[in-house]
Image (spheres, rainbow, N blue to C red):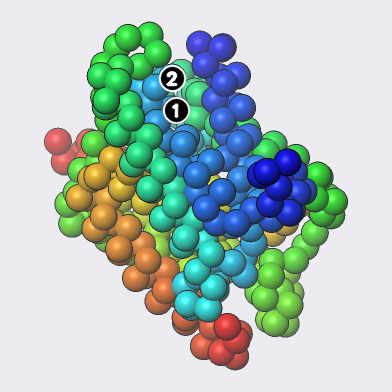
């Protein structure tokens, strides 16, 4: 074959451009098929609504969450399944308690590592709602649709991500890169 | 509606599969992007923006129509001081946990169960937003 690249696309890591192309195509595909912008973080609100359908909080009772089992829930579920499949095909362990250098360099008990991750997740949960989107909604969908607000938000994401990761590097991981 | 949800499930699978294959599901890859020692994930994001931009351009040339002929309405993101504060909070959380709302699902799917803590934090943070911010907006109206 002319196109042999030496990569086993099913089970090996992809180069950045291949992943970028597949992920980027989701933006026009979601508009073409469903007139919806790519985005993940709103799905967490859909998830809460599905679990707590009678919540008195007004935001969950607004029109955008009127469908208890909204489509975003299926998108999030699909993402987990896709990763399960990718990991299975690559022969990765079904379950692991590792979290990269955070568990290999940091001699913290797992619950404490969990607390750190929970705090990071909490900040993202509130932050994404205040910002109006996350990496997919703003940085990919928003920039692919040339929105100035997404550019400013993305620059802020990167600056503060670099800040916190470098604080972790200096104060927790002994400067390892 | 059921057909939409099946297709969306499939597209989600493609997303989760790709995120795992470019290793965005690994804590170290996000960490290295933010400390500047490996920019693979940043290139993935830039590549996705470029392809998304080209794809939207193609849709525009085809008349900005969806498959059933209605006109495409791009979801517009507003900007105010609160959204930049939110972006700062989000970015700091991203750098701390080595995951974002999308890649945490790829983490969990690929067996990194500590990602469940990040996921729980995001659910709690989303709930806190509805409880504190949105309820306050309604009270002051």
The C terminus of chain A sits in image quarter:
bottom right
Q: Chain of mark 2?
A: A
Residue B47 seen = yes
Residue at image position (81%, 44%) is A89
Look at the picture and state if A26 lies above or below A139: above
Of residues A21 and A44, which is closer to you in this image? Answer: A21
Disc ID at residue A55: none
Nearest the eye: B7 or B134: B7
Which residue is labeled 2 in the image?
A33
Residue A172 on image: x %, y %: 58, 84
Q: Few, some or many C-alpha atoms within 10 Å of disc 1 (few <14, some 14-19, many ≥20)? A: many
Q: Residue at x 68, y 43 (%)?
A: A2
| Whether residue B99 is situated above or below residue B101 in the rendered picture | below
Task: Determine the secondary structure under disc 1.
Answer: helix
Residue located at (14% from left, 36% from top): B141
Residue A50 visible? The answer is no
Per the image, label 2 sits on a secondary structure element best described as helix
Q: Name the one closer to the observer, B97 or B36.
A: B36
Badge 2 vs badge 1, beta-carbon distance below 8 Å: yes
Circle 1 residue: A29
């Amino acid at each position: 074959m002319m196109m042999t690249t030496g990569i086993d696309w099913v089970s090996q890591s992809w180069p950045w451009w291949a992943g970028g192309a597949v992920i980027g195509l989701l933006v026009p595909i979601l508009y073409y098929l469903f007139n919806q912008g790519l985005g993940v973080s709103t799905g967490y609100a859909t998830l809460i609504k599905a679990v707590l359908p009678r919540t008195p909080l007004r935001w969950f009772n607004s029109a955008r969450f009127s469908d208890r089992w909204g489509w975003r829930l299926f998108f999030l579920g699909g993402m987990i399944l896709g990763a399960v499949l990718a990991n299975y095909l690559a022969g990765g362990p079904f379950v692991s308690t590792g979290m990269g250098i955070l568990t290999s360099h940091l001699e913290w008990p797992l619950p404490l590592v969990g607390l750190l991750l929970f705090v990071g997740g909490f900040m993202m949960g509130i932050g994404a709602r205040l910002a109006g989107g996350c990496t997919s909604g703003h940085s990919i969908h928003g920039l692919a649709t040339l929105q100035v607000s997404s550019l400013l938000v993305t620059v802020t994401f990167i600056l503060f991500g670099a800040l916190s990761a470098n604080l972790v590097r200096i104060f927790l991981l002994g400067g390892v890169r | 509606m059921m057909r939409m949800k099946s297709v969306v499930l499939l597209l989600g699978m493609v997303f989760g599969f790709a995120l795992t294959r470019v290793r965005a599901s690994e804590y170290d890859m996000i960490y290295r992007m933010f400390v500047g020692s490996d920019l693979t994930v940043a290139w993935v994001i830039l590549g996705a923006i470029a392809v998304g931009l080209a794809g939207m351009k193609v849709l525009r040339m085809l008349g900005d129509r969806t498959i059933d002929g209605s006109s495409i309405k791009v979801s517009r993101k507003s900007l105010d001081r609160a959204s930049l504060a939110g972006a700062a909070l989000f970015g700091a959380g991203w750098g701390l946990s080595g995951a974002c709302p999308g890649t945490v699902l790829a983490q969990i799917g690929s067996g990194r169960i500590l990602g469940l803590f990040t996921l729980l934090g995001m659910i709690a943070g989303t709930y806190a937003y509805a409880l504190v911010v949105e309820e306050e907006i309604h009270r002051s109206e």
